[in-house]
Image: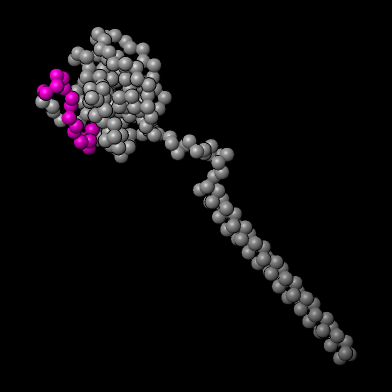
Amino acid sequence: MASRKNQAKQVRLDARAAQIKAQAQREARTRNIVIAVFVVLIVGGSGALYFLNNPPSFLTGNNSSSTQAGAAYDVADEGHNHVPDGTKVAYKHLPPSSGDHYSSSLGPLPWNTYNSAVQPESFVHNLEHGGVVMVYKCSGTECDDMYKQAQDVFSKLPPKLEPVNPQGAQQIQEVKFLSTPYPNMSPKVALLAWDKEQDISSIDLATIQAFYTQYGDHGREDLP
């Protein structure tokens, strides 16, 4: 009788041991799965972050010429004759950085920032005097914002000597910068000097200062 009781007890002990072993195996598998998931998330997340920060060239369209975007470039000279007020000049390059222009009260204009569009036949004469002209495309309230940005730029540029004719007349110093809305062009913002242009995506003070320093005072009437 005692032998049968001992056998039954052993069976229960063995069953309990098997349950504990099975439970431990399930917990180990669950733990391994959780660890594996975390590893995948960490490795995958790192890879995704790297991919976002370093996208392949076929997605971004990067090429060697993209580093040159926004650099100033030469524009073919279109002449420099004076034309009667009201004459519309058919400029080949828009916005124009040279060409025929007005020579009366319509040009050259006082150096300033203008919140309404200035005719190119007027500001081209400012370019001939060695000034820098900034033209920009805008619409709605954006025009007011860009006008205020242009005013801030104007206030931070140094004055330059204004050329005069005849030779020997006293020169005066002015901030030789003019800005105006100008819708008829591809770039958002363009910096102009005589036969020079630099296209930029926004009104950036440092870029404008560099262009003004390098290309200001290089109009036809500033050249020997």
Q: The C terminus appears in which quarter of the rendering?
A: top left
Q: Quadrant of residue 123?
A: top left
In the displayed structure, 196 sits above or below 119; it is below
Q: Position of residue 111 (x, y in %)?
A: 21, 26
Q: Position of residue 19 (x, y in %)?
A: 76, 74
> Visible in this render: residue 195?
yes
Is residue 167 a member of the stretch shown in magenta? yes
- At 63% from the left and 64% from the top, the residue drawn is 35
Q: Quadrant of residue 129?
A: top left
For the residue pair 124 and 12, the one nearer the viewer reads as 124
Q: The N terminus appears in which quarter of the rendering?
A: bottom right
| Magenta range | 154-169
Q: Position of residue 98 (x, y in %)?
A: 32, 20
Q: Is residue 74 left or right of residue 103?
A: right
Is residue 103 a member of the stretch shown in magenta? no
Q: Residue furthest front?
A: 224
- At 18% from the left and 33% from the top, the residue drawn is 159
Q: Quadrant of residue 223?
A: top left
Q: Is residue 210 left or right of residue 40?
A: left
- At 55% from the left and 48% from the top, the residue drawn is 51
In the displayed structure, 92 sits above or below 67; it is above
Q: Main secondary structure of the magenta part?
A: loop
Q: Position of residue 181 (x, y in %)?
A: 31, 24
Q: Residue furthest bottom?
A: 2
> Visible in this render: residue 121?
no
In the displayed structure, 123 sits above or below 52; it is above
Q: How is the image coloured?
A: one colour
